[in-house]
Image (tube, grey):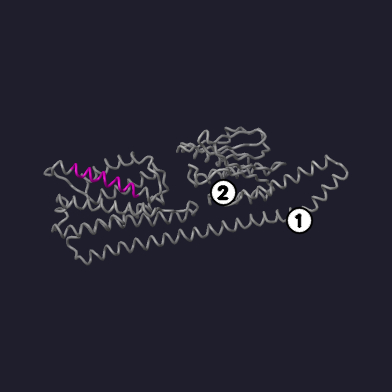
Amino acid sequence: MGIIINQNNSIILYLVIIIFTTITMFLQNKILMQLLNTKGEKFKRIFLFQSILFSITRIILPVRVHKIIEVVTQIIIYKRILKIKLEKILFAEEINVIIFSVTELISIKVLTEIYEVNSLEAALYNWHFIIYITLTAILAKIIIYIFLKKFNISINIPECISIKSKKQIIQVATISTILIIFNEIEIINFMYIIPNTIYLLDIILLIAYYLLSTINMLKTLQIETDKNEINNLESNNDRLQHNYDNICAFKHDFGNIMQSFGGYIATKDLDGLEKMYNDVLCECKEINNIKSFDKEIINNPAVYNLINNKYLVAKKYDIKINLEVYIDLNTLKIKTFELCRILGILLDNAIEAAKDCDEKIISIKFLKDNYNNRNLIVIENTCKNYLLDINKMKEKGFTTKKNKLFHGIGLWKVNQIIKKSENLRLYTSRDKMFKQQLEIYSWK
């Protein structure tokens, strides 16, 4: 509850409010971080700011205002400082609000009966009432945090869901949070004049509304996830079929290849034998390269699906893709969404450049550099235009395509992501191959 203090209140009450607010904010941040599955590198800064701000709002503002300010401020802080996706923050905040609104409503009603408080004004200036309400809230937060931590409960919203689904989550979570807050405020205002049965029914309806909205939101996410899974399976099917056909063709021709070797050996044509051996060796490398396109090796589902889709696109242009993965992709200190966005743009550019070359080759390497405490993603491709200015390529609107509309923003966007991240670097170079090297440092 909010507390309004007049000149007759002791300075001790101010200190009590500050102490309790500090403890409450600490626990609330821990709960939100658990729900959001994020680390607390910037926790001290957030915690200090919230403790000061919310202590002031609880002292000088009524409950209607300070509760709204707390929720809005919390969302802004987590969005701006911790860079959490808006739909995920709102979902977590909705859970946070409903849990503590119900806890607060029940505890207020019980303590109101115990202390025989018959008006909101009397409650706001009753020392014992305020302290016990706050202690109850703190105890509830401790229990909830322990429960979430023990069972490792957190919010998981797939990053691959559509923009439409994200907007729906944001809308439902926002409306639910607003309704819960205002409903709690109204219940507290009229709790002293409405019957206990109506009070209890209101709480039950509040919980029911939250559960229905959440179930609807989870169903939407499940449908979206199922659709993505089906699309992934279809893409993987196409790739596996293509690979199977290649292996079958190679196996079918193996006897003929051996006989051809015999012909070169019989005539002692070493030059012809060497040329044919190199061609067969190249074919063997391509067959072995298929092993790299495996879920166990590319162990991040989003990256796996992205690379396989780009592999199918490259095959349409007869581009040969060489893939080497020597790291655990789930340990990279970068958000999967940002990684896929960068990879997608770099691979699209590599395919676009390689398809016009006589020798169509793209090389993708995921490497570990222990000495510099970083991971490397190196994409190399053959390129026809060797006169391009590498620095200009990162400028917005730069493109070699004749149709300038909707082109020339890919590398510019990658550069914007790199600039916002403390542990990412991208180096572009050109020798025999055009090379993009993404460096992901582990000290984030």
Left or right: 118 in relation to 358: left
Residue 252: numbered disc: 1
Which corner quadrant of the image does residue 411 belong to? Answer: top right
Q: Residue furthest left?
A: 8
Q: Quadrant of the C terminus?
A: top left
Q: Residue at x 59, y 51 (%)?
A: 294
Q: Does the magenta stretch include residue 28?
A: yes
Pointers 2 and 1 in contact (C-beta within 8 Å): no
User: In this rendering, is residue 431 above or below 335?
Assistant: above
Percent x, y of residue 132: 19, 52
> How many numbered circles are shown?
2
Left or right, 431 with reference to 169: right
In percent of width and height, residue 60 lies at 21, 44
Q: What residue type is labelled 2?
A: Ile
**Which disc, if any, is residue 396?**
none
Residue lying farthest bottom? 197
Rendering coords of residue 70 (x, y %): 29, 47
Q: Which residues make up the magenta segment?
A: 14-31
Residue 303 seen in render = yes
Q: Is residue 231 left or right of residue 95?
A: right
* Disc 1 residue type (three-letter): His
Label drawn at residue 298:
2
Magenta stretch: dominant SS? Answer: helix
Is 301 colored magenta in this rendering? no
Foreground of the two, 134 or 149: 149
Distance of mark 2 from mark 1, alpha carbons? 29 Å
Mark 2 crowd level (few <14, some 14–19, many ≥20, 10 Å Cα): many
Compared across the picture, whether 275 is left or right of 167 comes to right
Name the residue located 27 percent from the left edge and 47 percent from the top edge. 24
